[in-house]
Amino acid sequence: MTGTYSCLSEVRDIVPCSVGLPNGDETMALKEGTVFLGKALILRHVLFVPNLKCNLISVSQLLDDSDLVMQITNKICAIQDRTSRKLIGAGERREGVYFFKGVASAHAYKAKGVGSSELWHMRMGHPSFKVLEIIPEVGSLGRNNNKACDICFRAKQTRETFPSSDSRAKECFELIHSDLWGPYRVPTACGSIYFLTIIDDFSRAVWIYLLNKKIEVAYVFKRLVAMIQRQFKKDVKVVRSDNGSEFLCLREYFDEHGILHQTSCVGTPQQNGQVERKHRHILNVARALRFQASLPIEFWGECVLTADY
């Protein structure tokens, strides 16, 4: 309800209804209209009450009309978009009433039906739209070519590119790339603070292992080589990694099994670029999902430093 006629749009007459005022008096509402609160909120069926000295918002009507989520505590109330969880508006409690302070300039997305390609782009961790076009149900939706994704720019920013190599292995497991990422300050549910990534250069198949300690790399690597020999009847010929101690301790094992160990030059992780790029992709997906969910990103500064190649 509102007592300000100028804030209403699409005003229309209605059947007169009685409205009680805060001072105990009663008056009649004869008209209703639509109120636009920024670009994010639209309030429909707002009653015009001439003698009302304030604006009152019905929570149930607000949630029905705009498909939002409201969080209420003993001090504040927050209005969020149901899909992206972006903060749209907030109110402060004073004398038992929540005073609405305003609306953020955010777009309210609605997840009804199949949705748009932009919505699926967010749901799937912000992949490129070329990847989305491969999926028939999503690719047929098309996209707005004039609309850039702000989340992608923030989550996938990189430094200047390093010259790439066109060489590639001629068969599976002829060359595999490996690297260890971590430690992370917050452990996973299973207590891991590292993850080991291994990529086959020919097929681009990827293995990712969660590890609690660096020393576990040797055990995991030996187990993977044994699995390749038993399941695929192949021998690993070349292993490419950085100069980390977790890989250098495997040199005796590599010599015994005739495996060549190639290491990148110090300060040049681009030479192990395949697995470094895969690390960047993994972190980009995780970072994009965190941005999309509006979760804290206080630990992600160190991730950018290790995944810029």
Image (spheres, rainbow, N blue to C red):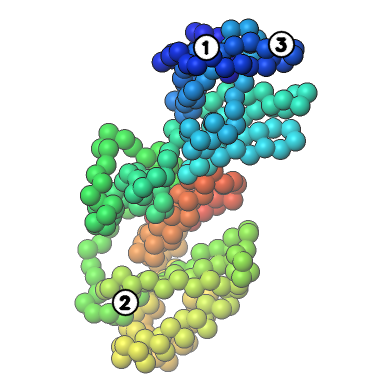
Name which residue type carries label 1: Leu
Q: Nearer the viewer, residue 111 or 154?
A: 111
Q: Is residue 256 above or below residue 61?
A: below
The disc, 2 or 1, on the residue closer to the chain's N-terminal end is 1
Q: Is residue 135 above or below residue 53?
A: below
The disc, 3 or 2, on the residue closer to the chain's N-terminal end is 3
Q: Nearer the viewer, residue 100 or 225?
A: 100
Image point 60% across, 31% down: which residue? 59
Residue hosting label 2 = 175
The disc, 1 or 3, on the residue closer to the chain's N-terminal end is 3
Disc number for residue 30: 1
Residue hosting label 3 = 25
Residue 174 in which image quadrant? bottom left
Q: Is residue 68 above or below residue 34?
A: below
Image point 47% across, 44% down: which residue? 83
Task: Tell me if label 3 and label 2 are in contact, CB under 8 Å.
Answer: no
